[in-house]
Each structure stands twice: as structure tokens, then as C-alpha cells.
Image (cartoon, rainbow, N blue to C red):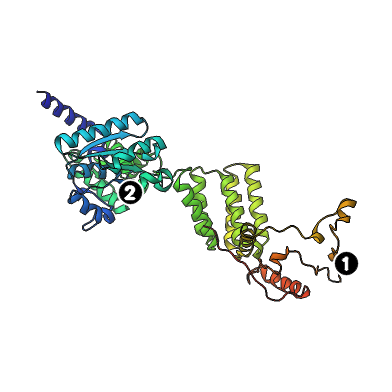
Amino acid sequence: MENLFESHRRSLRERCAPLAERMRPRTLDEVVGQEHVLGPGALLRSLIERDQLVSLILWGPPGCGKTTLARLIAKHTRSAFVPLSAVSASVADIRRVVQEASDRFAQHGQRTIVFIDEIHRFNRAQQDALLPAVEDGTIVLIGATTENPSFEINAPLLSRCRVVVLEPLSDQAIQTLVERALVDRERGLGELGLRIEPEALRLLVGLANGDARMALNTLEVAAAGAQEGTITVELVHQAAMRRGSVYDRAGDAHYDTISALHKAIRGSDPDAALYWLARMLEHGDDPLYVARRLVRAASEDIGLADPHALVVAVAAQQAVHFLGMPEGALALAEATVYLALAPKSNAVYRAYEAARRDVVQTRNEPVPLHLRNAPTTLLRQLGWGVGYRYPHDEPDGIGRQDYFPPLLRGRRYYEPSDRGWEVRLRERLAAIRAARGQRAGPTESGGGSG
């Protein structure tokens, strides 16, 4: 009788569950997308089918199937499945689960999968509590996270797990899931006999942004308001309310997007740069942070090929500070286009990196006496400033002395490019070096940042 009651309660719960929950794949073959890890011959699928479990960190955006995959692994490998909440589980809870897993294996020979959704929310103490049990195989850990495991999972635990990268579902995969839910009579909406307009289907797929959960839950809301059995574009708009987004202003998406913006500017593509700029601003990123990165791009990737680039970038920052948003967005857009179209040179960046490297890696010799200021009689008596020649007294205003410490005498860092304003600077620098009697000397250079 108790088992019958439990079965009835479970059946009732399943019928009342959201559509996305009801439509979770029950077998590996029902999974749509993620062919790179679950397709025929893929390593993870082979491990599952051979019941050779390893601890995993499933890394991917919301709605890509992390929880579904964890449950399917437990089902196909005949393991006990124990979910833990990363928000509420304590170290004591972890130790209790580990002890139960040890007892389960001793008594029944059954392994235990401990599934921790949003494992990046576990603090160091909680993660450390998992280490011994993962190390000796008492539990198989499956952690799910939307954040980069390299930054969020401590190194000892990460080294004991295999990271599986899951991608956002393709539009075709989302469409397949939506169409499957519309015709499934057991778990989906098949009993309602609904149809969806082709344009509404395309809109729903686009709004889902690769998130299966968002697509199915939006479909369910739209279905509830369908008149005459048809889901229209307007219904989808109303059901979605807003576009699904995996953007996290403090997470990987933030840094990936600013990297894309910077690289588009560096690559002289104003259109792509404007897209990434708009994506950051529309998702609520701090416009002053964006402005700071534009200033960095002006210095690092344009430099003296166009000295006005830095002026424009700083002016945009000031405009945003003065105007606020949304008005300041146009100032950032103007600066972004200017920087993208400006001639590119990383000569200043390379020169500074080379100088910095010499500061760090070589002996920091005392400043030569002739370069020191001598504000007092004692310092002049000690030789400070003696022998210094004032460049303005030279016929061409060019100093002929050595300005390096002896160890680095003759060092060269800055070598202008042959682009933009630096063409003139190259000519000017060549004339200065000739006047100073400098021949081609040692040149230090550095690389570029990401």
C-alpha cells in the first residue's frame, strides 16, 4: 500500500511538473545536441555504456542539459543518485552523504553518484570535504557549473575530475525539442492538438538563445493562451517577456565579451566592435568599465600611429561620466568606431613591456650623477648634476649624452611602425639617433595582450 501511495504521488508530481521537467530525456538516445560528448563513439558515452564511471565537472550555460546528463549517467550505470544543494549543504551534510555512500557500497555493492548543481557556489571547505571520497572512489562526483572551473573549483578537486564542456543547444536542436513537446501525448502537449505558426516557431527558437528550459517553459505559457489551437508570434512574445540570456556581468560571459570587443577593435572591424559594445551595454555592463577598456585599446593597439585615439577614448569616458546612460552609449560607440578604423601599432606597448622587463630582470643601477638634480650645495659638492648638458643649448635641441645607466647603455625599446602618424615619428627618431651618433643597437620588444 505504501509503495502504491508513493507511485501515485510521484505520478501526480510528474503531471504537475513544468513542461521542461516533464520532457527531460529518459535515455541517451533521446538527448538532442551535445553530439561531441554523447554521439556514437564519443568517450563519455562509451564510459557510460561500459559502466566505467569517473568524476565529472559538467561546464555549460543554463538549459544545455547538465542535470539531465547527470541523471542519465546514474540511470544507465545503476548507481545511486544523491543530489546536494550547493547553496544549503554544509560540510556535515557532505560527510553524512559520504558515509552513506560507503555503507551502501559495503552492503549492496552499489556505487553512489553525488550530484552538485552550481558547484561553483561551494566554498573551499566544502570542496575540500569532497576530496578524500573522490580520491578513493567512495563517491563519483558530478558537479554542474555555468562558471569556468579553472577559477571556481580548487585545483586539488579539479585534478581529480574530468571537465566536460557542454555547448548551448543549436537552433535546430531547440526546434526539435519544441516540436517533440507539441506532439508528445504522454509528457508533452500532444493531447491539446496545438499547432505553432512557422514564424512563431522561429521566434521561439531565437529567443531561447540555446536554452532548452527557456524554450519549453515559454512554449508551455504560450500554449495556455492559445486561441483556436494556434500559437502565434504575439503569444510567443507575451510568453517570453524578454530574451533568454546567459550573460553574467561578473562571470565568464562578461570577460569573453570584452575580449571580443577589444579584438574586433584591434582587427579594424567597426561593425563587429559595435555589436559587442551593444551586447555589453544592453546587458547592463558598467559603461565606465567599457570606457576604461577602450582607453586601454587606444594605448595598446593604436598608440602613436594615431595619437588622437587616446584623446577620443578619454573624451568618451568623460562623456559617459558626465551624461550617464543611455545617452553616453553614443559616445562609446563613436570612440569604438574611431578606434577600429584608426591605424594600428603596438610599438608603444612593446617598448614599455621591454623596458619593464629590464627593470625586473636586470640590476637597477644608481641614477648616473650627471642626471641627478642638485638642489643643495652639498649635493653639488658630491658631484650631482656635474657634466649635465642642457639640450636647449644644442644647435638642434637634441641631447648628445647617455641617459641610461651604464649596464643598459645603447638599449632601444621604441621602434615606430610604418603605419599612420608613426611614419613621421620613425623619420624623426632616425634623425635624432643619427644626431646622437647611435648606430643600430640592441632592441628589446614584447608581445601583445589578450
Q: Residues within 10 Å of mark 1 (few under 14, many from 20)?
A: few
Q: Position of residue 83 (x, y in %)?
A: 27, 35
Type of amino acid under label 1: Asp
- Establish if 410 lies above or below 75: below
- Give the spatial CA distance, label 1 vs label 2: 74 Å
Q: Residue at x 30, y 48 (%)?
A: 201
Q: Of the residues under marks 1 and 2, which one precedes in the sequence? A: 2
Q: Which residue is mark 1?
A: 393
Element carrying mark 2: helix
Res. 303 image quadrant: bottom right
Type of amino acid under label 2: Val
Residue 433: numbered disc:
none
Judge depth for marks 1 and 2 and give the one in front.
1
Horizontal relation, residue 77 to residue 65: left or right? left
Quadrant, the N terminus: top left
Q: Which residue is mark 2?
A: 205
**Front residue (pair 115, 289):** 115
Q: Position of residue 311 (x, y in %)?
A: 68, 55
- Establish if 217 lies above or below 364: above
